[in-house]
Amino acid sequence: MIHPSYSELIDKINAGVEPGEEPVVQSRYSIVIAAAKRARQIIAGEEAMNLDPDVVTKPLSQAVAELNDGVIHIMSDEEFAEEQARLDAQREEMEAAREELLEFSEDSEEDETPEEEKTEEE
């Protein structure tokens, strides 16, 4: 028997859903897709978040264990869109700050004309 079962994972993932809200996961398919995506991330080089490497060695097993332990969670489409918008806004703020820093750096370099050049101009 596979542990945890699909129904156990679905129950754990949907545990935080308020009554009347749509559950995040409604089918086994959602669990399989989420575990496969996470396994691909682990294969690509991301660290497994909570596991003893001696116990679980295969990326898919690590992904399922992370889902089961609540270390990662599946986002609804709305949550994903909100998170993406938040990250985009944060990225824009960082880019604006970077541009401001570059402008400040260029201005301060122009102000620091060497003394030799000043005396030659006079």
Image (tube, rainbow, N blue to C red):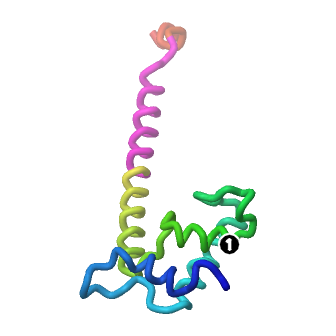
Magenta residues span: 95-114
36 or 103, nearer to the observer: 36
Q: Is mark 1 on a helix, strand or loop?
A: helix
**Residue at 27 percent of width and 79 percent of height:** 18
Rendered image quadrant of residue 92:
bottom left
Q: Quadrant of the N terminus?
A: bottom right
Residue at the far front: name it: 1
Report x, y in % for residue 44.
Answer: 71, 65
State whether residue 1 is above or below residue 120: below
Magenta run includes residue 108: yes
Magenta run includes residue 92: no
Q: Is residue 53 left or right of residue 116?
A: right
Report x, y in % for residue 119.
Answer: 49, 7
What number of labels is visible? 1
State whether residue 24 is above or below residue 115: below
Type of amino acid under label 1: Ser
72 or 8, nearer to the observer: 8
Give the residue at mark 1: 61
**Residue at 42 percent of width and 38 percent of height:** 101
**Residue at 72 percent of width and 67 percent of height:** 43
Q: In this view, does 32 lie to the left or right of 106?
A: right
